[in-house]
Structure formats: structure tokens, C-alpha cells
Image: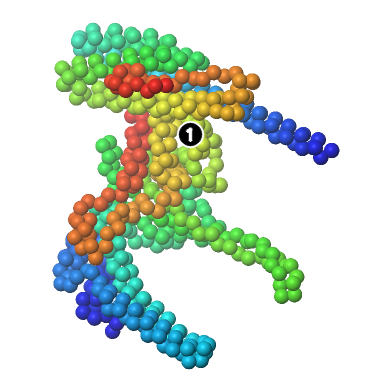
Amino acid sequence: MTELWVVIAIAIVLLVTVIAIYNGIISRANAAERAWANVITQERQKNKIIPHLEDVVKDYKAFEQSTLTQVTELRSALQGLDANKIDTAQLEKTEARTGQLLKSLNITVENYPELKASESYQKLMKEITDQQDNIGAAIRIFNQNVEDFNNGIETFPNSWVNGLLNKKVKIKTFSDSEAQEGFDYKPNF
Amino acid sequence: MFYRGNNQALITQLKRLQHESASVSDISGFERLMDRVKQFPGSYQFHYRSYWVSLAMIAMVGAALTFYDWQRLQHMQGSSWLLVAVCVAALLLVLGLMIYPWQLLRSVSARLLQQDALLDNGIKPVSFHSPALTRELLSRFNEFHRGNYRREVKALYEGRFDGDEYAFDYRYLHFHYVDERIVIETYTNSKGQVRTRRRKVYDHYDRYALIMPFQFVRDVAVVSFANSLLSGSTYKPASNRFNERFRVIAGDELTAAKTMKPAVVVALEEVGELLSKPNLEFNGSADLCLSFADNDMIKTPSKVTLSDFTAFIEAIEGQQSFAKLQRTLQSIHYLMTKLDNNF
């Protein structure tokens, strides 16, 4: 009789452990998805800035020619982002377009000191910097949550529970390929 | 009467420095005090040789007499114990005479270094009436509603931070509170019966806080050290790391969502790494109280004493910085720049 109770107790402990691991994987997956949606929300804030940018530079011909194409490319990259589907490649593309636009903006504005000194331009640049900071932070949070999720499905015994029940696959973290190009070192993983 | 020559002069000098340092409130006063330190004609090294000799002699004479007494009668008697007691008392007296100047030198050195560090960082001690200040803090922030037995402010300082975009005055304070609780103990009385008794136990705690105006946020609290009085809507940002450490409580969820931008969340995660048990309370009057358990925020990092005179003067003449305070104030400034919404 005692042996039966021991077996039942062990079975209950095992069942509770499996349920806890199963739920843990689900909540970490949801947290990664929410962090991704957060990144996309922050990226889409750029749509609010672009009209202000166009407004500020509209009187400067050199700006119009060089930036309009890049603004269009950025808009189309932003449209390609989906809050419901984690796609770090598309995010990488959008961030690259933003980087190119800001780089060319910074170079061209050197020829227009009065524009560079204007209050509206200064405010716009501060807003863009704030937005980039928020996007950077949202990406950092996304990568942290993805790391938690990946650890949650790859470590033992979670890997067993995931293989049998959850069947979730590892999520790729976001990495800045443009920044990586500057390094000779490539990690071997 | 126990100190002579340089030792006596050094103790008089240290006592005078200790007394005069209490009234120093500005840089010129501190410089005058340091002139007095430099003008001391003697050495800041206490000479211990005669005390070591006395210790050795007392020990040897005591041991010899006790041994003689014991050898005579082959057992310890009243006079032997009296001899031992006299020797031990003499040893303790000499040890006390050695420890006192060492302790005085350490405390005066630490006091001077601390005053210099405060002046270097533009921080001034403020006189205050603890019950009145505690009442004021209780009315402004939930953070100070701790301790069911006693609450008091033990120290108050004022300073100013000049950032790239914002400058603000801040107050730093040390808050002490005591919780009273009743414990029930079981014991066995002289008749061998098991009995219970109630005993009051007092637990002492310390919190430290930085208080400053923060005009961009109202009615939001970010809490890592629980406070039962805080109530309102709770909000969870997307970060697992943040949610493991902090709880966000706000007047309404929308305010919390607007405040908890990703850059703010990451900055708060870093504050959580920097400080122990930090709580941020933005009250309804747009003031921020950042409280924490760290007691080293405005403590001089230097440990040098006057006995190493050259190193001590170098430490005083150099710039001492409170690294943790600076990083904390920079984090608060960063939060201001991320929450100013001026576009």
C-alpha cells in the first residue's frame, strides 16, 4: 500500500513539474512575442517623424534629391515589418535603411549651417535620437527575452518537455550586421 | 598623564581637529583646518615602543611571580589569582592606552576625508528637526511609511547636479525605522515545566533616499522593495529582466504605459543593477524619491590615515568622487531626457 502511495506521489510531482515547464515555455514564448511587437511599435513611430523630416528639409534642394529616395526605401521597409511574425532579417533591413538615411542627413546638413542651427531641426534630431534609443532598448529587451526563451527550450529537462509537447523552435536574436562588418573577429557559433 | 612628548602633542592635536571639524561648513573653513593639520610641528606617527616594552614587562613579571607563588605551594591560591588579576588589568590598561590614539587618529582622518569628499562633490550637510522632517516625508511619499515602532531621519544633505540638458537640486537622506513584533518563546522553568512567554523584538532597518523635482512624471512607482501602502493599476513592460526585479504601480495604466518606454525600462534595469533594493516613487507633485539600501553612496572611498601624511594630503588635495552617486544622478538625468516629451 505504501509503495502505491510513493508511486502516486512521484507521478504527481512529475506531472506538476511537466505542467510548470510547459507553462514556463509558453510564457517565455509570449514574452518574446510581446517584446517583438514592442520593437515593431517603436519602429513604426518613425512614420510619425518622416513627415516632419520632409517638412524641415523641403526648402533645401540637395536634401530633397538625396533624402526622398531613402525616405521612400525606409517607408517600404517599415511596411514589411509584421508585429505578429518575428522576422529579424526584415528588422535588420529597416535599421540599415534608417542608418543610411541618418548618415546622409548628417553629411548633407553640414552644407546648411542655418538649417543645422534651427530650432526645428535640433528638435527633430533630438526626437530621432530618442526614437533610436527606444528602438535600441526595445531590441535589447527582445534579445534578452529571446535568450530566456531559447534557454527555456534548450536546457534539460525543458528540452524533453518541449520536444514532446510544446514543439517550439529556437528564435534567432537580432544582430546588427552593419556593426558586425567593422569587426575582423567572427564568433565560431 | 599616560602620554608624553610627541604622543601627548599628537593626541591634543587630534582632539582639537575633531572639535574644530564639527563647525566646518565651507571650503574656506576646511582649508583653515587643513592649514592647522599641516602646521603641526610633531609627527603624526604614534610611538608605541614604550608601550610594547611595558606590555612585555608586565607579562614577564606577572608570569614569574605567579610561577613563584604556585611553585611555593604547588597550587593556585588567593594571592596567585590576585596577582593574575592585577597583571591582566595592567595589560588591558596598556592595551587601551595603545588603542585609544590609534582609534582617534583613524576617526579624525576619516572625518576629514569625508568632509573633503562632500565639499569636492558640492554636498552640504543640512541641519533639521527629525520629527518635523519625518512628518513632511510621510505626507509626500509612501516610501517612508515603514516601521510600526519608530521612524526617524538620521542625516540630511543637499547637492546639485548639472547635466547636459537638465540641472536639479537634490536632497540625500538617511532614514531609519524600527519594526516591533511579538515572538512567543517556549522555555523550561525551574520545576521542569514547559512554559510559553511573549517577548517584544525590535528590528532595525535603514533606507537611503535621493529626492528631487521630476516634472515629467506623476503618480507612478517602480518598486523592487515592497511597500504595502502603494496602490493603483499595475503594469508590466515587455522585459522579463525588468519584471523579475520591479513592479510598476500607477494612478492609471495609460500613464504607466507612456512612462515605461523601452529606453526607460532598460535604464531602470541598470539602476536595479547599480543599487540594492531600489524604489522610485514619482508623487503627485512631480517629485521623485529614489530610495535604496546602499549605505556607501556618499562615503569617501579613501582609507588613508594621517599617519601616512603625504598620501593623506594627496588624497585631500585631489578630487574625491562618489562614483555610485554620480552614476545614479546620471541615470536620473537620462530618465528626464527620455521622459520630457518635448516634440
Horizontal relation, residue A105 to residue A26: left or right: left
Q: Residue at x 48, y 49 (%)?
A: B143
Horizontal relation, residue B273 to residue A178: left or right: right
Viewer-closest of B141 and A150: A150
Horizontal relation, residue B214 to residue B147: left or right: left
Viewer-closest of B105 and B46: B46
* Residue B123: % across, % down: 29, 53
Q: Amino acid at mark 1?
A: Arg
**Residue B1 location, quadrant:** bottom left
* Residue A111: % across, % down: 15, 17
The chain to which mark 1 is attached is B
Q: Is the residue A181 above or below the residue B296 in the image?
A: above
* Residue A177: % across, % down: 35, 17
Q: Residues within 10 Å of mark 1 (few under 14, many from 20)?
A: some
Q: Which residue is mark 1?
A: B241
Q: Is the residue A101 above or below the residue B127 in the image?
A: above
Viewer-closest of B24 and B205: B205
